[in-house]
Image (cartoon, rainbow, N blue to C red):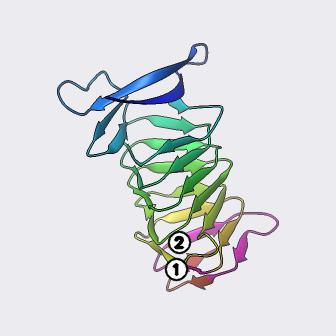
Amino acid sequence: MKALLISIVVSFFLIFSAQVNAEDCTGDVSQRISCYENNILKLKDSGKTLSSPGTISFNDVLFTGIGGWDIVSNLSILGTSTIAAGSVTGSGNISIPYGSLIGSGTLSLSGGTTTIERSNTLGSTTPWTFYNLALGSGAIVGTTTRGDVATTTVSGRLTINAAHTLAMSTSSWNLAGTSTPLSILGVLNTGSSTVR
C-alpha cells in the first residue's frame, strides 16, 4: 500500500486533508479515487481538487475520471501524465522533467507555468489550454513533438528554451498572450501547422 498526502475538496463546504491510501488496482476499486497499477497512479472519480501547501510529486499519473480534477497545488510529475478521459483544470505550476503530457481528455489551465524539460510527445485529440508553456530545460538537447492536430491555446507565453526544438507538425496553435506570446530561445519548426 502506498500513500500520498493531499487535500481533497469534496464540495464547497467540506474540505479535508488526509493521507489517501492508494492501493493496488485489484479487487473492487469502485469506491477508490486512486490506486496504483504498474507504478502508475490512477486518478478516477470527478469533482476533486489536488491541493497541498507544497509541491506534490508523482511518477506516472493517469487521469481516468469522467468528470474533472482541479489542480491547485504545484505538481512535479517525473514520468508521463496521461489525461485519458474527463477534464483537468487548475492554476498551479506543473513540472515534467522527464516525461510527456498526452491523452484524449481536456486540459484547461488558467494560471501557472507548465514546464516539459526533455524530449516528449505533447497534445490531445481535444483542444488544450495552457497559461504559460515552457519547453526544454535550457541545457539538455530535446524535441517536443506534437502527436495530434488539435488546437493548443497558450493564453500567456509559449517559451522554447535553448537546446530545445518544438516540432509543430500539422497541429494548430493559438498564441493568445497580450505582451510577449512567444519566446524562441531554441528552434521552432512550424511544419505545416497553423499558428495565430
Residue 83 counted in the magenta span: no
Q: Quadrant of the C terminus?
A: bottom right
Which picture quadrant has residue 155?
bottom right
Secondary element at image label 2: strand
Q: Which mark is residue 172?
A: 2
- The residue at the far right in this view is 179
User: Nearer the N terminus, badge 2 or badge 1?
Assistant: 2
Q: Is residue 70 positioned above or below 156 on the image?
A: above
Which picture quadrant has residue 195?
bottom right
Q: Which mark is residue 193?
A: 1
**Magenta-tinted stretch:** 163-186
**Residue 58 x/y as whole percent:** 46, 44
Q: Is residue 168 positioned above or below 112 on the image?
A: below
Which picture quadrant has residue 33?
top left
Q: Which mark is residue 60?
A: none
Residue 181 counted in the magenta span: yes
Residue shown at the point (50%, 28%) measured from the top left? 5
**Residue 41 x/y as whole percent:** 36, 41
Measured in 3D between alpha carbons, the distance from the residue under mark 2 to the one under mark 1, in whole angstroms, is: 6 Å
Q: Are marks 2 and 1 in contact (CB under 8 Å)?
A: yes
Q: Is residue 71 positioned above or below 186 on the image?
A: above
**Residue 120 x/y as whole percent:** 45, 69
Counting other residues with Cα less than 10 Å from the Cα at mark 1, is it few (<14), some (14-19), or many (20 or more)? some
Q: Is residue 155 positioned above or below 139 on the image?
A: above
Of residues 112 and 11, the one nearer the viewer is: 112
